[in-house]
Amino acid sequence: MTTVGFIGLGVMGSPMSIHLVRAGFDVVGFNRTAAKTAALVEAGGRAAASVGEAVASAEVVALMLPDTPDVVGVLSGPQGVFTHARAGALIIDFSTIRPDVTAELAGNAADHGLRYLDAPVSGGEAGAKAGTLSVMVGGDAADVAEAQAIFDAVGTTIVHVGPHGAGQTVKAANQLIVAGTIELMAEALVFLEAHGVDTDAALDVLGGGLAGSRVLEQKRTNMLTRTFDPGFRIDLHHKDLGIVLDAARQAEVVTPVTALVAQLMAAARAAGDGSLDHSALLRTVERLSGR
Amino acid sequence: MTTVGFIGLGVMGSPMSIHLVRAGFDVVGFNRTAAKTAALVEAGGRAAASVGEAVASAEVVALMLPDTPDVVGVLSGPQGVFTHARAGALIIDFSTIRPDVTAELAGNAADHGLRYLDAPVSGGEAGAKAGTLSVMVGGDAADVAEAQAIFDAVGTTIVHVGPHGAGQTVKAANQLIVAGTIELMAEALVFLEAHGVDTDAALDVLGGGLAGSRVLEQKRTNMLTRTFDPGFRIDLHHKDLGIVLDAARQAEVVTPVTALVAQLMAAARAAGDGSLDHSALLRTVERLSGR
Amino acid sequence: MTTVGFIGLGVMGSPMSIHLVRAGFDVVGFNRTAAKTAALVEAGGRAAASVGEAVASAEVVALMLPDTPDVVGVLSGPQGVFTHARAGALIIDFSTIRPDVTAELAGNAADHGLRYLDAPVSGGEAGAKAGTLSVMVGGDAADVAEAQAIFDAVGTTIVHVGPHGAGQTVKAANQLIVAGTIELMAEALVFLEAHGVDTDAALDVLGGGLAGSRVLEQKRTNMLTRTFDPGFRIDLHHKDLGIVLDAARQAEVVTPVTALVAQLMAAARAAGDGSLDHSALLRTVERLSGR
Amino acid sequence: MTTVGFIGLGVMGSPMSIHLVRAGFDVVGFNRTAAKTAALVEAGGRAAASVGEAVASAEVVALMLPDTPDVVGVLSGPQGVFTHARAGALIIDFSTIRPDVTAELAGNAADHGLRYLDAPVSGGEAGAKAGTLSVMVGGDAADVAEAQAIFDAVGTTIVHVGPHGAGQTVKAANQLIVAGTIELMAEALVFLEAHGVDTDAALDVLGGGLAGSRVLEQKRTNMLTRTFDPGFRIDLHHKDLGIVLDAARQAEVVTPVTALVAQLMAAARAAGDGSLDHSALLRTVERLSGR
């Protein structure tokens, strides 16, 4: 029975860790706010009092943390994974963080005799609960093969996209497209409403043609009814667009529309909508249009 | 047997008129370049030597013309539809033109005792040939009902979206979303390629999640292989974005991302890519990134 | 003594017409709202009851009207200048309108045996009152020479920039630069204030270097004190940016930053700031930043 | 006689260090490429073989380095200023770096018993040679007063704009405005040329009104003649806009136009124009417009 040390039991990590228990893994969870281990324990997992305790006997160390500095801290910090993990353990970072830092961390892991996969996910809280996440994996093929059962426990679409960091790069591209598509939907909707068009009929026909998208399907009700319970929060998408733009700059890629979308996401956050679903970007377009 | 006068037998109008013949309509076609009536005649339709001749005995007058001034000229010009059509005839404008001009033309039609529907389509040349267009219809419900057999002959998704002009407004929203989504795909692809990611695997996983879209599915091969035979030409999408921005300005709607996408489409055209498929917007992002 | 028919006695036209009286011209003014002729009459000019009456005996016809359709109406309309002006009269259009329409109107004027100069001005209400406007003149050199005394009466910088329409093109470029520079100042100020910097000292040093500009000098107090009495209204600058973008599109010039600035000016107007000075674009940046 | 250790004798630092010699300071210079100390020595200064040697006996330590990591390395590195400087020495950082890192470094300096001023300059190579730079100073008033003779030796406009980091913040605002103004000039010029206007006459009248700016005056010839010898290189302005956008994001300020200008500057660099003067941003607008 494989032991998985799982660090970060928030809105995503908690249901993912429980799926691992159900798939037969021995899961030892740690979370900074200890109360969040309760659901895992109830599902048959164990709670650890420290990162070190969580990973000490684990063959696999899974991370699901908010941002780049959190991952760096948990891995490289004085009480971190690099110093406490078993020799040869496989680290799987499900967090969405900077691709360049990921590549560096993979190198550091190797220096400590550890293996590393970046495996950011898409599908949000709903996908985490349903175990239907998409997983974008970067790293060595042998490690990906070894981790397949872990990935299958939490997701349905598992794709190995390249070497260390490639998973994060693809996730960045995902966030670029999703944010931009929401903004386009928002501009289209405000445009249609301002012209007095029947938006429900309009979205039917738009959705049936080349303008159709998963965002149109899944965020349509949110946007038409102005119901913006997350879902995926604007604060997080704002953070992710920062990662996208930094990575674009490093690769000397020019992405003018994404740069502008990032400004509008920042405006949404500045307006106090940070804890709403990212489809609430609609409210920024409405405010700009005085509606 | 209903007679349809069909004005404009270009890359879209020609196959549409032939579908009408096959559906049992008596179609009399006119095109400025007379040679383009040949395919219609071969399919069993008739050719007219003037707009007046094409519409003189028609219960329905269909238009499929490049731009707003073309439609205005054919309808209001000295030898135009308004003066030559039978009393009570139903004009169906399949062209993509300005919503405000459309509303005006519908009023002028009524002044001449004629009825009017705006019915722009999406689905491109392929949809026109297959008879699977989406049709966005604006006008009176009774006229839409009467035209149903016509619409069914050329399309599969027929939606009545509102009063005169609403069809054009929804088509404008369609063009807004499609152009923007192509640009986002282009930025994502150049970003992925610059980072050395396996783009084929990446598009698999992106397409399976919230980043998925009809543009990703249908333009993926064009973009990955840099094969940009139209399809829908950049020149035409550039024209349509002009319509979108004018209509947004009139409605006092602020659409910053669309305004920027329109500039990039203009840049594609300025670079000489006007006759390529709109997915060639990828080339503009590549040029900006020096790739 | 040269007779000048002056059409349009608003906030700009009224002081300009009075400067002409003071410079020794016989000025016959017309305004749609008749009460606005009072100041001209008091200064020694005459009031006309119609465009026709104003221009019947005039060697020079001056126009200062809000927008393109106004100029077209006054010139080409049934009771307009083209039908009522004396043979050989020189029309000087001080309004800011579309360059392409201007070139057409100049041709129409010639068809009626009339001469034409486009002569849009910058310097605003203050410049009009002080007689210190800048005048950008398009048309034939001989006509410019003949009009010199008129121009000298209302302005201090008079430049002949090219053929018919060139004056309007240069005015469009002026509006492009001014709107963009105000937006840059706004972004810089909100940036400085958010970082808690002494903005007064900062503007001193910025103004002394390559960042210095007439906008920084003249709009500094407005922006630092949030006092936005016009000046030049956002509504008008919004109209002018529409002219700029149309003219750029016609010339196939790509101006991404101007397109974005135009969206922000539209947002300022949509937020209800249309009647404030254009430096109130600062308020749009503040709203975007949640400040 | 005050001894100044001067680290970084590049295109800016070399003439600045020589001005200090001429003003009576005992200057000990260090540069990674040792040959660059020659000009200083010829002017009467001294050359050091290491940072430690340069600062060992200095009351003032001046830095003029390319980017944030360079300054961090020279100050905090193992052979750095923090460990080798005399107790109580005053560090003056003339480099343009991140405001947040600057504030941190000032704190670190205090921990080592050292004092710190950030004093980025504007005016470029020409200003450095002429000793007419503008200096934006952040830090304690007493330290600014003590450094006045240093500042007077290299610049003419010296402004204390706030606490540690404020100098860098104001410099960032400067770079924001300058880059944007160059882009506006570029868009205006391409617009004017595309319309066939006499650009020389046009710039005369534009420069005389509200569109006038130092950029228009100083970069006019470069742009009209397409002569882009630096001056201030695109590579450096690209770096500086990265600092601006990071600082804006940290302060939660939304700067859409600056974000877009930064993308165009990145495009200039990607096109191979990185070593040209920043006014060569004109070439990016020309390429976008296919001219």
Image: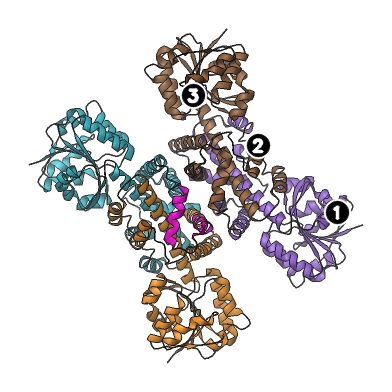
Chain colours: A brown, B purple, C orange, D cyan
Q: CA distance from mark 3 to mark 1?
A: 61 Å
Q: Which residues are magenta?
A: C264-291
Residue B198 drawn at (x, y percent): 56, 29
- The residue to which callout 1 is attached is B42
- Where is residue A284 shown, x and y percent of the image? 54, 47
In this view, the mark in front (2 or 3):
2
Q: Quadrant of residue C213?
A: bottom left
Q: Is residue C287 magenta?
A: yes
Q: Residue at x 37, y 49 (%)?
A: D176
Q: Chain of mark 1?
A: B
Is label 1 in a helix, a strand or a loop?
helix
Q: Is residue B1 above or below residue A15?
A: below
| Residue A102 lies in the magenta-colored region | no
Judging by the rendered image, the residue that carries numbered circle 3 is: A164
Residue marked by disc 2: A218
Mark 3: secondary structure: loop
Q: CA distance from mark 2 to mark 1?
A: 46 Å
Residue kind at label 3, given as amino acid type? His
Calculate the distance from the C-alpha at mark 2 to the C-alpha at mark 3: 31 Å
Q: Residue A84's spot in the image, x, y percent?
A: 42, 12
Res. B264 in view: no
Q: Amino acid at mark 2?
A: Gln
Q: Are marks 2 and 3 in contact (CB under 8 Å)?
A: no
Hey, what amino acid is under mark 1? Glu
The crowd level at tag 3 (other Cα within 10 Å; few <14, some 14-19, many 20+) is many
Task: Give the letter of the chain under mark 2.
Answer: A
